[in-house]
Image (spheres, rainbow, N blue to C red):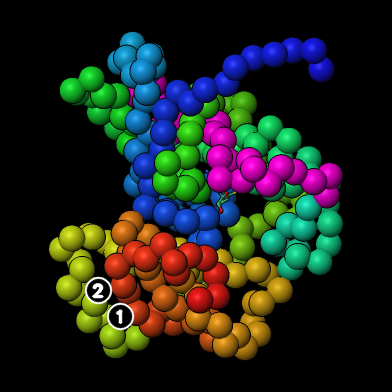
Amino acid sequence: MGFSTQIEAVAYCRTPYKQKFGIPRQPGLVDFVRGFVELTAPYNHIDAVRGLEQYSHLWLLFCFHENLAQGWKTTVRPPRLGGNEKLGVFATRSTFRPNGIGQSVVKLHQIHQGKGKVVLEISGMDLLDGTPIIDIKPYIPFSDAIPDAIGGIAQQAPEQVEVNFSNQAVEQLSRLEKRYPGLDKLIQAVLAQDPRPAYKKGKPDPKRYQVALYDLDIFWYAQEQGIEVETIQPFCAKASGAGV
Ligand code: SAH
């Protein structure tokens, strides 16, 4: 109440995740995937990150910019609970929040500087490509890590499912490996999270699904024993989201 401030992006995040569907639901779940935080003017000065290289991890505060237009609700249905039970918005990490602010701990690998750019190379992020970053802070283990904390409905990381590739997908991957090193590992790790709503887990599901990584569409089916990658195609905006 009674305060006013203008919030603007200090950086934008570049990630392989081109659509919301399929992005890991928290940071660290797919921990090896690299991303880049590109500082914007007037924050793109190396002095603004002086000393940051001493930290292994960062807090990124960001805006759920793709969800702002939809607003927020008092209660939400967390995917973890299969979409049946409602919890208060402030009792969840819902992306539909009054101020649309997200927070993620990510690993810092390197700070790149040159041609007027300052770019932080990170990994483990759960952010959409192009996400506006509104603040960056060092992660301080003595205070930020609480090993015996109680984690409510999210005490444990979700279980992973098995991911298999069709013969066609294996062939496509061998052709794409040069241009997208580690693509097989990325697809495997993203789909092992089973991006579908939790109530679908372990049930037969005839739908064809798609996730967008880099400029590729990955088409897949969920089977009883796990996920099968059917085919990999150039990205097509029309294919967007679940069940195509
Ligand atoms: N760690 C953060 C975000 C958790 S939710 C927090 O707790 O605040 C993670 C989900 O946010 C992803 O699965 C993705 O679907 C969604 N997401 C990521 N970036 C987004 C963006 N820029 N706009 C809207 N949704 C986004």
- Residue 89 image-quadrant placement: top right
Label 2 crowd (10 A; few <14 / some 14-19 / many >=20) = some
Looking at the image, residue 55 lies above or below residue 178: above
The alpha-carbon separation of the residues under discs 1 and 2 comes to 6 Å
Give amino acid for label 2.
Leu
Determine whether 229 is above or below 106 in the image.
Answer: below
Ligand 1 contact, mark 1 (Cβ < 8 Å): no
- Relative to 168, is 190 on the left or the right? right
Q: Which residue is mark 2?
A: 173
| Identity of the residue drawn at 74% across and 68% down | 82
Q: Which residue is mark 1?
A: 169
Say whether marks 1 and 2 touch (CB < 8 Å). Answer: yes
Relative depth, front residue between 230 and 157: 230
Is 199 covered by the magenta stretch?
no
- Residue nearest the viewer, comparing 25 with 75: 75
Q: Magenta part of the protein: which range?
A: 51-75
